[in-house]
């Protein structure tokens, strides 16, 4: 897959960073907003954030890399999160996840060759009474079996 | 005609939005005037999407609905008719205090909320002093519903007594435990209850600012909570002049970033401050040095959402329910391989077996139940021989279990308990914040040691026991400290799954 051009829009980054400076503990909301705008947290934002918050770039890297949510590169057009937690395991979640990864020829965090879907593990979507559960972008799907997973993957263009 | 369709994530995950579209279309085709009201879920997840049609003031249920049912639901001839929803066994047997409105009202209608008793607790609290508010919570016997079970009133007293120019109320909505969804359900189904509870907490301890730290895995709950906070602010429930009292309280919804450990309160506070979500050593207690070093109440969603009903009905009314030192109601979340999964609110004291077999109806697969994990990924696997255990904090502890956030995940006899023990260690390794060695290194070694057992190395079993002791005694927080609980409960109660011969493994 062709790599997307690195985001280099310093004006937009500066605006997003500035919008959050009035908050108490602004860093996480700031990182979420940057990722919302660009699909990942662009490297070009690091110096701007560090200067604005008076923290070192090492500290900033520590925060970004601590959390599973933040990306340093774009994901596929859709993100499919498959729950790996106990309740989903109790009703065949592990087999479902293995079959899905095998079908797509991916490992966890991998993206399909056509750039349509990135598959990620998630530990609980709060759908434990209608497991196994997955989430395609922001849309939740419960009692996922092979047929329902097929429909989700087709919809995502995988 | 009024038709109620849930907008809870679980209902949506099972097709509630498609059912709603079909109902709109069917109504148009038949020329009926239908008002569709979105609600939370009643908690009977096996019946979702559960459509309710109001006839003569009674709400009749139909479920689990599919889009093809729409026309016959509207004309009342659908074969999935359940009768009046309030009369269903599952509903009648509950004591719904915290969840009284969930599934009943439009979550984002403040008028609906008021009409069902909402804000009366806050109005009463506005007539009390901070100390009187704290005393009322103490008298209710409410204990932290996040898992630790610490008396909420005592925590509030500490913050009340602390002198500081700014104090905070932080709601822990980082509900990461598998098998739990009560926080999500109430935030999606009755968000004003949480807002009201946090406001009362603010009045009680003298805090004017609140934060809800809500996990990013719950996009629907985030949307509903944000909208509810906007509505509450626009209506004068939040802001500089709460309900015209002259008292100030406002709040923000903050989104987590996928770290399980941030459900631990000190790690959550670091995350809220914009730091790595590593655990802080205690003392100092967050009640004295919490968010930004200020006195902070950190309470779970259900704890805070229960506060309004305590003030509405009185502390004694709440305390009259329960068992021993576990007062009030427990919001059981019945999940996993179970025929009837969902949320059931009842007085503490019900037995584990009654929940699994009577309420839950046994396994969904129809196979015998093998184990139930109570209390999330850090809770013990309880065997069927412990089904007489009563669900109360001390009662379950005495049986080697952990009530935690009251989630129960049922497994049938196909479950491999060695695999589940390995997963507990693997999960701990993935999610460890890295601050303390027993958790960071121990979890990795735990996975390796269980792999040795799986390969038939009997010498590895005492090593695993020893490692679990070290993790339990030496970890800084519950993640490393309680991961040994599911692991050792699996070893203790299901030794057959760990006794693998070398030949079989090879």
Image (cartoon, coloured by chain):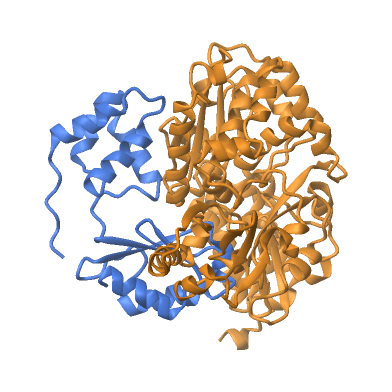
Chain colours: A blue, B orange
Q: Is residue B465 above or below residue B134?
A: below
Residue drawn 26% across and 57% down?
A75
Instruction: Give the percent coordinates (x, y) of residue B265.
Output: 58, 37
The residue at the point 38 percent across, 65 percent down is B28
* Quarter of the C terminus of chain A within the rendering: bottom left
A20 relative to B473 in the view: left or right: left
Whether residue B121 is situated above or below residue B148 in the rendered picture? above
Residue in front for this viewpoint, B149 or A131:
A131
Query: Residue B460: in sight, yes or no?
Result: no
- Residue B80 appears left or right of B435: right
Vertical position of residue B65 compared to residue B219: above or below:
below
Residue at (36, 36) in percent of width and height: A29
Q: Which residue lies furthest to the bottom in this view?
A: B503
Which residue extends farthest right? B324
Image location of residue B413, percent across then percent down: 68, 79
**Image mark count:** 0
- Residue A143: tell me if it is visible: yes
Q: Pick the residue in front: B253 or B402.
A: B253
Q: In this view, does B370 lie above or below A129?
A: below
Q: Where is residue B25 in the image (x, y as percent from the top left)?
A: 38, 66
Quadrant including the N terminus of chain A = bottom left
Residue B54: x and y in percent read: 59, 58
Relative side of B266 to B487, left or right:
left
Tell which of A155 and A88 is nearer to you.
A155
Q: Which residue is drawn at 25% across and 70% down?
A: A112
Q: In the picture, residue B498 is in which quadrant?
A: bottom right
């Amino acid at each position: 897959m062709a790599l997307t051009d690195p985001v280099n829009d310093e004006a937009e980054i500066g605006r997003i960073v500035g919008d959050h400076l009035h908050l108490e503990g602004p860093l996480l909301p700031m990182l979420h907003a940057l990722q919302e705008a660009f699909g990942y947290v662009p490297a070009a934002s690091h110096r701007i954030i560090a200067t604005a918050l008076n923290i070192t770039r090492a500290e900033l890297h520590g925060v970004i890399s601590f959390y599973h949510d933040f990306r340093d590169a774009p994901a596929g057009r859709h993100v499919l999160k498959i729950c790996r937690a106990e309740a989903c395991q109790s009703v065949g979640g592990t087999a479902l996840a293995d079959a899905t990864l095998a079908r797509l020829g991916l490992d966890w965090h991998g993206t399909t060759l056509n750039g349509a879907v990135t598959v990620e593990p998630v530990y609980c979507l709060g759908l434990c009474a209608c497991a196994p559960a997955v989430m395609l972008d922001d849309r939740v799907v419960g009692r996922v079996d092979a047929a329902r997973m097929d429909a989700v993957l087709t919809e995502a263009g995988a | 005609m009024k038709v109620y369709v849930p907008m809870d994530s679980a209902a949506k995950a099972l097709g509630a939005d498609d059912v709603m579209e079909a109902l709109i279309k069917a109504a148009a085709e038949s020329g009926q005037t239908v008002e569709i009201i979105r609600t939370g879920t009643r908690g009977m997840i096996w019946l979702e999407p559960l459509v309710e049609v109001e006839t003569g003031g009674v709400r009749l249920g139909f479920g689990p609905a599919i889009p093809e049912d729409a026309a016959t639901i509207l004309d009342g001839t659908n074969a999935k008719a359940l009768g009046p929803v309030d009369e269903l066994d599952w509903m009648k047997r509950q004591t719904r205090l915290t969840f009284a409105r969930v599934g009943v009202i439009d979550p984002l209608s403040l008028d609906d909320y008021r009409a069902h008793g909402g804000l009366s607790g806050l109005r009463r609290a506005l007539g009390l002093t901070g100390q009187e508010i704290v005393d009322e919570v103490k008298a209710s016997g409410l204990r932290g519903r996040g898992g630790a079970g610490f008396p909420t009133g005592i925590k509030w007293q500490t913050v009340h007594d602390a002198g500081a120019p700014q104090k905070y109320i932080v709601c822990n909505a980082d509900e990461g435990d598998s098998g739990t969804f009560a926080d999500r359900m109430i935030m999606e189904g009755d968000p004003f209850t949480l807002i009201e509870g946090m406001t009362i907490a603010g009045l009680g301890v003298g805090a004017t600012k609140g934060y809800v730290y809500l996990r990013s895995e719950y996009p629907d709950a985030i949307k509903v909570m944000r909208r509810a906070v906007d509505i509450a602010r626009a209506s004068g429930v939040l802001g500089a002049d709460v309900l015209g009292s002259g008292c100030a309280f406002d709040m923000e919804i903050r989104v987590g970033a996928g770290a399980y450990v941030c459900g631990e309160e000190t790690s959550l506070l670091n995350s809220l401050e914009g730091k790595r979500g590593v655990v802080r050593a205690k003392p100092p207690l967050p009640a004295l040095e919490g968010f930004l070093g200020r006195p902070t109440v950190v309470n779970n969603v259900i704890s805070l959402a229960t506060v309004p009903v305590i003030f509405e009905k009185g502390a004694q009314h709440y305390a009259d329910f329960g068992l021993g030192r576990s007062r009030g109601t427990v919001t059981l979340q019945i999940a996993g391989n179970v025929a009837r999964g969902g949320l059931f609110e009842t007085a503490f004291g019900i037995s584990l077996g009654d929940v699994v077999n009577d309420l839950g109806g046994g396994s969904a697969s129809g196979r015998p139940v093998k184990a139930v994990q109570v209390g999330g990924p850090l809770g013990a696997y309880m065997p069927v021989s412990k089904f007489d255990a009563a669900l109360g904090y001390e009662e379950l502890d005495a049986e080697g279990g952990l009530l935690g956030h009251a989630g129960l995940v049922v497994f049938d006899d196909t479950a491999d308990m060695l695999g589940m023990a390995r997963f507990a260690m693997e999960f701990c390794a993935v999610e460890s914040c890295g601050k303390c060695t027993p958790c960071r290194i121990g979890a990795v070694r735990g996975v390796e040691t269980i792999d040795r057992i799986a390969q038939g190395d009997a010498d590895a079993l005492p090593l695993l026991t020893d490692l679990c002791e070290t993790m339990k005694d030496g970890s800084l927080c519950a993640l490393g400290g309680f991961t040994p609980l599911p692991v050792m409960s699996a070893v203790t109660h299901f030794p057959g799954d760990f006794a693998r011969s070398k030949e079989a493994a090879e």
